[in-house]
Image: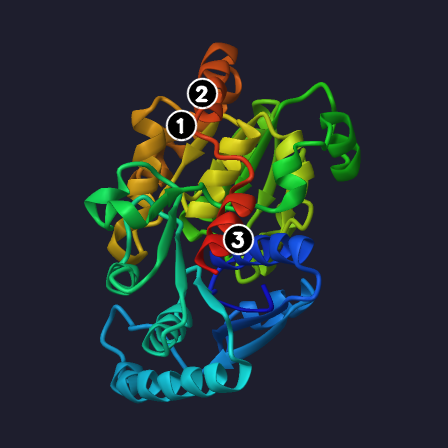
């Protein structure tokens, strides 16, 4: 394998799996050139170079869900990004292209397919978005994270691999003792971890802000990743066993410390929770394409592997549910055992095996 393009991004849920795939390629083919393609102005333009890889940006953007003058520019941005993608392909000459979802994935994979380059789609959710459903018709392989995806994709193209997660989390080597020491938490009190994804989650933040004192009085420590935009308004709550973080870099230690996790239901978050086997309360975001987070959460909830709290109900019941679960050892054990059975370890290796098959 000599040259590979990996396209996509927009959120950590797309970027971290992409980097995990790239790392596995590099471990097998140290001389392989890997070029990431992202969308200008999105977080991948910073996160990918930090991981040690080269990235180029396309002038692509998403459709705004409400009336917005920016939508008038979208057709021009799509055409421009397609031309940019074609230029990159001619110059870089990849042997294979991988799409992990996000704005940049569509024009890059479409132009690769038009150029006759084998493409692989990594579909992270239990419900495939429109873009991947279109691209799948010409894709050679489709790596999925959930069973029964043959309802959407051609069965002969599907490989059930799971979602790649960060090596430090997948290894599960972090100990609770090390984690508590790292965050300065007490060993005799339970820990509630709240994560709203790499960009934060307003509903979770609002519920926890209003219920912070209730959590503290229940003798529960709260490790809370609130996101960059919310941090200035929440940072002063750091007291009484409550820690507010803009972003938690050492998520392996955060999971190791946690007794219970509150989380959105993005594909990466769900895959991580399965691997670390933590009892969780999922609050799916309703503001995502095709409501795919609710579908992800229902897979776990229907299997008795997580508690699902609707976004519209979180303000009323989330904190009470979290406190109740933290104190119920029987339910925590039941959820933990069930979610462990839904994990797919070594997803990155299985996906690179598929890439090798294309070549």
Residue on which the image places disc 1: 306
Q: Residue at x 40, y 64 (%)?
A: 119
Q: Earlier in the sequence, mark 2 or mark 1?
A: 1
Q: Earlier in the sequence, mark 2 or mark 3?
A: 3
Q: Residues within 10 Å of mark 2 (few under 14, many from 20)?
A: many
Which residue appears farthest toward the top when viewing the image? 330
Q: Residues within 10 Å of mark 1 (few under 14, many from 20)?
A: many
- In which quadrant of the rendered view does residue 92 lie? bottom right
Q: Position of residue 235 (x, y in %)?
A: 63, 52
Q: How many marks?
A: 3
Colouring scheme applied when the structure was drawn: rainbow
Residue on which the image places disc 3: 17
Gap between marks 2 and 3 measured at Cα: 25 Å
Q: Position of residue 32 (x, y in %)?
A: 64, 66
Front one among 334 and 321: 334
Q: Considering the numbered disc 3 on the image, is that residue within a helix, a strand or a loop?
A: helix
Gap between marks 2 and 1 measured at Cα: 6 Å
Q: Is residue 210 visible?
A: no
Residue on which the image places disc 2: 335
Q: Considering the numbered disc 2 on the image, is that residue within a helix, a strand or a loop?
A: helix
């Amino acid at each position: 394998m000599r040259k590979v393009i990996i396209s996509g991004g927009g959120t950590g849920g797309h970027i971290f799996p992409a980097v995990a795939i790239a790392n596995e390629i590099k471990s097998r083919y140290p001389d392989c050139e890997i070029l990431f393609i992202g969308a200008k102005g999105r977080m991948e333009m910073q996160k990918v170079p930090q991981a040690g890889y080269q990235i180029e940006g396309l002038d692509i953007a998403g459709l705004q869900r409400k009336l917005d003058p920016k939508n008038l520019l979208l057709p021009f941005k799509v055409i421009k990004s397609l031309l940019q993608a074609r230029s990159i392909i001619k110059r870089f000459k990849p042997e294979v292209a991988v799409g992990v979802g996000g704005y940049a994935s569509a024009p890059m994979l479409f132009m690769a397919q038009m150029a006759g380059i084998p493409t692989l789609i990594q579909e992270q959710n239990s419900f495939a978005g429109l873009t991947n459903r279109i691209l799948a018709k010409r894709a050679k392989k489709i790596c999925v994270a959930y069973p029964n995806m043959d309802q959407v994709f051609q069965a002969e193209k599907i490989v059930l691999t799971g979602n790649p997660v960060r090596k430090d989390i997948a290894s599960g080597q972090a100990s609770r003792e090390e984690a508590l020491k790292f965050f300065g938490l007490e060993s005799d009190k339970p820990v509630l971890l709240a994560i709203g994804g790499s960009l934060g989650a307003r509903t979770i933040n609002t519920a926890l802000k209003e219920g912070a004192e209730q959590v503290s009085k229940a003798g529960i420590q709260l490790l809370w990743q609130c996101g960059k935009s919310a941090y200035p308004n929440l940072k002063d709550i750091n007291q009484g066993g409550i820690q507010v973080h803009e972003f938690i870099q050492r998520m392996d230690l955060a999971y190791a410390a946690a007794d219970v996790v509150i989380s959105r239901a993005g594909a990466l978050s769900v895959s991580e929770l399965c691997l670390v086997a933590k009892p969780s309360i999922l609050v799916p975001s309703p503001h995502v394409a095709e409501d795919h987070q609710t579908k992800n959460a229902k897979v776990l909830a229907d299997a008795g592997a997580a508690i699902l709290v609707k976004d519209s109900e979180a303000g009323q019941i989330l904190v009470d549910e979290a406190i109740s679960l933290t104190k119920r050892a029987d339910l925590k054990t039941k959820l933990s055992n069930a979610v462990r059975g839904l994990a797919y370890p070594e997803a990155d290796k299985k996906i690179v095996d598929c890439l090798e098959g294309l070549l």
